[in-house]
Amino acid sequence: MRAMVVTKAGAPLSLEERDVPEPAAGQVRLRVHACGVCHGDVAMWQGIFPYKGFATYPRVPGHEVAGVVEAVGDGVSEHAAGDRVGVPWLFDSCGQCRSCRRGDGVYCKDTHVTGVTHDGGFQDHMIAPAHSVAKLPDGVPFEEAGPLMCAGLTVFNGLKEGNYRAGDRVAVIGLGGLGHVGVLYAAAMGARVAVISSHKDKAAEAERLGAELFIDSSQEDVAVALQAWGGADVILNTAPSAKVVTQAFPGLAQRGTCVVLGASPEMIEVKPGALLNGNRKLTGSTTGGPEDIRRALDFAAHNGIHPSLTRFGLDDAQAALEAHLNGTLTGRAVVLTE
Ligand SMILES: [Zn+2]
Ligand SMILES: [Zn+2]
């Protein structure tokens, strides 16, 4: 089988021919059909994520995996050959610590990450723990299910962490692979949506996806524009920029919440008065647990969430990583194995 491998941090992907792996007890083997490309994959490739030394090499990237179970190890009863499934960012965790016990395995100190500490979906077949694998709803094609496993889950959970309520005004910062899915989810939940971007050529796409307002952060005072709109009840920052959060935060409505979904090494600056005067909140969120995945997938299936895709063949996965890094993509890059 083919596997696209990062042999060491910064090295371009190399194509390897490997034996098809056999699942051990508690594991399943998938025939991978599609794998979305996330910023986490680019960071793993470059050796900078989640922190230096965490990723191990050689490594097959990809944590937005969609495929079909083709073999199960001993003791696996919840999945069977032929099941359509997805594999998320969270490959496994200790299951015992405080984070794991409250469903936050993603924050476990002993977290194992698909495509970062274990081989992911940039290959024809992959192994995953049976308890980490999610069933895909009928009718969601593999190439759309892949990006929902991380991008969809992240924005879905971000809206939850932002205490989103039907009819709220939601401002989405960034309209890339993550941001455009954020607009789709928010609009499908009945939100009034604004998009904040420094690329004014994204205005038409924002409108097409369901946004009523486009704010060009390179030209406009973002907070003034948001307050003129009525104030954002939720801000989702999907861009890897702290500066734009600093700009947007004073545009929150009273009791509004700004949720950071994109990491950046810079500091976010917020005046205490902006927090005090109106109970505004600044928080962060990353992916989610199994129940969040089930809900995010189910919501997408029943509300017609269709991510925009730029498709790449498996052999061409390096081009997908580079397109993501260079910001030249439309929507989400997805690597297809056939
Ligand atoms: Zn991701
Ligand atoms: Zn744990």
Image (tube, rainbow, N blue to C red):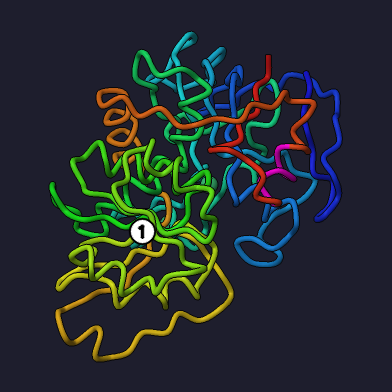
Query: In this image, 146 relative to 15: left or right?
Result: left
Where disc 1 sits, the SS reads strand
The image shows residue 116 at horizontal and vertical percentages of 65, 48
Query: In this image, 318 relative to 113: left or right?
Result: right
The image shows residue 233 at horizontal and vertical percentages of 20, 62
Identify the residue shown where x is 44% and y is 13%: 83
Residue at the outermost top position? 82
The image shows residue 67 at horizontal and vertical percentages of 54, 20
Between 145 and 292, the residue placed more toward the observer is: 145
Identify the residue shown where x is 18% and y is 41%: 190
Whether 324 is among the magenta residues is yes
Q: What stretch is highlighted in magenta?
A: 320-325
Q: What type is the residue that disc 1 sits on?
A: Leu
The N terminus: image quadrant: top right
Query: In this image, 104 relative to 85: left or right?
Result: left
Quadrant of res 12: top right
Between 140 and 133, the residue placed more toward the observer is: 140
Q: How crowded is mark 1: few (under 14 residues within 10 Å), some or many (20 or more)?
A: many
